[in-house]
Image (cartoon, rainbow, N blue to C red):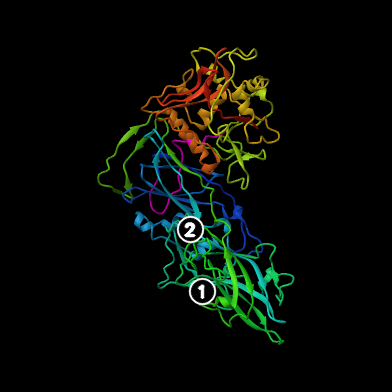
Amino acid sequence: MALLAASCSSDEAVTTGSGLQPTEGNNLVVYIGTASNLSRAAATTDPGQAAENQINRVTLLIFGQNGIAKSIQEVVPTGQLINTRVPNLAVGDRVYLAVNISSNVFSSISRLADFEETTIAIDRAILGGSSNDQVANPANAPMFGKATLQYVTGRTDAFQATVPVNHMLAKVTLNTLNAMLLGDATFTPTEIFLRNVPEYLYLSTANSAAEQDYRFFDNEGRNFYQGEVSNNEFFRAYLGTGANLGGFMPTSPTLTATASSWNDNEPALVFYTMPNNAGTPTQLVIKGQYKPANTDESKTVYYSMYLNYNTNSSVVPNGGPTRFQLYPNYNYSVNVMIKNAGTDNVDDNPNPDMFQYFTKVEEDYTFGVLQSVNAQFHENDRQNQSETSGDRSIAGIDTVNTVVSGSSYENYDFLDNLSVGNFLFADGSYGSVPNNPGKTPIGIIFSITPSTNDGAYHGYAMALRDVNSSTTCTWGPAGNIEDLADLTGTSSYTDRSSDMEGRTNTTEYLSSTAYAAAQAARNYSVAAPAGTSGWFLPSTGQWFQILTTLGSMSTADALYYGWDGSTTNMVSNQCAQSINNRLSALPSSTYDAFEMATTTGYSYWTSSEYNGTDAHTVVFGSDGKLSFAANASKSTTHRVRAIIAF
């Protein structure tokens, strides 16, 4: 398996128009997902998040606390991994990610204040580089996020930041179109389009409707765009269906006096638009032929409706707190009931009494593929800490060359589904979370080298939660287990780390309920997928793998029982934090994080026996020490974390 994130000397970054070159410095790793897809702006079915959440290019921008750009670089991802180098990182640096946006957009940027004025034009944002001006590209939709670099807990040579990234576009779905007309009146839709779509968007974020961290369109001296074919002024084909609805025309398009409906079995039409304020609100317009009751003559009418607004309720939908205003990262799903004739022209101030409509936001149009940015020094890498912007040195920052010791740092390889740090899902499949939407993770992969005694499995995964929510239990009664070798005193960690027989060990204990730890692991409440080993109590060797792969502990520094940390370097906390960083790809409510051993430590049982009276435990010590093979009386109580072979 390639440890791509461990590269320390040969990474070459893409140059940018800013002239800032990431030459020497911290290794920076970004985990993302990439693919390609293409879909029309107006579609008879929703392209879906799989198409909309693609990442095809990323511009990484890092600014120091003084607002000076440290690095602006565009990186084309390989698979799901970006690995590049960024100089002069420090706690408090601001990290910005502009997804599917070329670095050319930022060619004149050297300061954060300039960046905050950056805008993306409508064609670039919605077309996504398509050569056909009638086609939107949801797979190249702009996304954006920001975060602040922090130290990894207990270390001064490693940085990390988790960057939430959101779509910058809004989405409009015409979900249902119904009618309840008088007499023999009819209405036949012929064209559906958006109007008052802003000319550009600012790069900023809106992580929730309550968070007003977003700059809306400033219409002073600017244009609004629309998608009605007969209106040439600021027309954009991708903002409408085209005349006569083209291929979107249903089999029976005419709505009548009864409560008839049109395309009510699936989303009828899907558009992408720009966030907009309520001053000149974006509207969805339904155009068509209306025939009044008791006449044979029809006429062209328009039904103009606000978005993020309900005619039958004073409550604003949950797509942002201000009515008529469109926020980024939301899907505005509209249901329409026509009861009267529309207006002769597009209506700037539509009268809700003319017809009824209801906007619902079923869920946030949320992008969640980007998981984290981690920057860490590699062993013996010489770092140049001079902070510059272009060729200008920043006053007060001296050049300091340091050699960083220690070889424990994060390794990431998400190019293969069968990779340490990816997840086992409830259906028995495995891989990264972004590539498996809708699946339920049940374990995190810590090894892809199963014991030969366990059978033909792909690897091992650790349960996401402690058994019984961190409650403790005894190991079992005293007395040697006949078929298990005692792992007593030894001068080498290899003896204790070589016991990979957790499944075999656990099987030995299942004959008696007195062996509480093994029974608890085996009966872990999450169902084991078909074709797996079932849950069992990990051995010392399997815990050693968890601590070295997920916990990033160095094998070179291991003693016969573990790692000899202190209250100064707190390796027990470093290991726990590293495991938690891996788990943080998931919502925090779905896993039990490993605690920081502050005033007291804590221990987990292994399935490995020390002797007749003692068994081995994994200890996260409050003194900073970390053990994978400390012996404890079998009658004492400790935590249980199960593992599984898959």
Whether residue 9 is situated above or below residue 77 in the rendered picture? above
- Pointer 2 with pointer 1, Cβ within 8 A: no
Whether residue 287 is situated above or below residue 386 in the rendered picture? below
Evaluate whether residue 229 shows in this view. no
* Residue 333 picture location, percent across and down: 59, 63
Which amino acid type is shown beneath numbered disc 1? Phe
* Residue 624 picture location, percent across and down: 41, 26
N-terminal label among 2 and 1: 2
Disc 2/disc 1 C-alpha distance (Å) = 30 Å
Q: Which residue is mark 2?
A: 209
Q: Secondary structure at mark 1?
A: loop
**Front: mark 2 or 1:** 2
What residue span does the magenta drawing correspond to? 1-21
Q: Residues within 10 Å of mark 1 (few under 14, many from 20)?
A: some
Question: Residue at left 38%, top 42%?
Answer: 87
Q: Secondary structure at mark 2?
A: loop
Which part of the image, by quadrant, shows the N terminus?
A: top right
Question: Residue at left 48%, top 13%?
Answer: 491
* Residue 268 picture location, percent across and down: 65, 65
Q: Residue furthest left?
A: 396
Instruction: State yes or no: residue 585 in magenta.
Output: no
Instruction: State yes or no: residue 5 in magenta.
Output: yes
Q: Which residue is mark 1?
A: 234
